[in-house]
Image: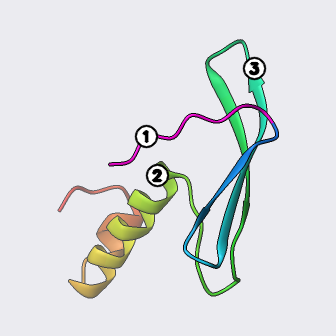
Amino acid sequence: MMVIRRKCGQAFHIGDDIHITVQEIQHGTHVRFGIEAPVEIPVHRLEIYERIQEENRASSSGDSLKWLNGVPS
């Protein structure tokens, strides 16, 4: 893992296509980022990404209706 320290308004790149800028820091605990990436690269918060992965696993195993109804597999 790489840890980067940036101030508000500063940015960094991931590869040639992804540009991340610190937009705002609130109360020293909340950070807002601006992320520029090609449309073919999905950008999600971790909890949304995990839910998508869960849904994909459920649909590939044939348990999609159980997952939609909240029944654990």
* Residue underneath mark 1: 3
Query: Residue 47: horizontal and vertical position, in percent?
Result: 46, 49
Q: Nearer the viewer, mark 1 or mark 2?
A: 1
Badge 1: few (under 14), some or many (20 or more) residues near its Cα, within 10 Å? few
Q: How would you classify the magenta stretch by its main secondary structure?
A: loop
Identify residue type, mark 2. Leu
Distance, label 3 to label 2, CA atoms, is: 20 Å
In the rendered structure, which segment of residues is drawn in magenta?
1-8
- Left-right relation of 21 to 66: right
Question: Which residue is depicted at the point 67% across and 32% down?
Answer: 31
Q: Which mark is residue 46?
A: 2
Query: Residue 65: horizontal and vertical position, in percent?
Result: 35, 74
Q: Nearer the viewer, mark 3 or mark 1?
A: 1
Distance, label 3 to label 1, CA atoms, is: 20 Å
**Local SS, label 1:** loop
Identify residue type, mark 3. Gln
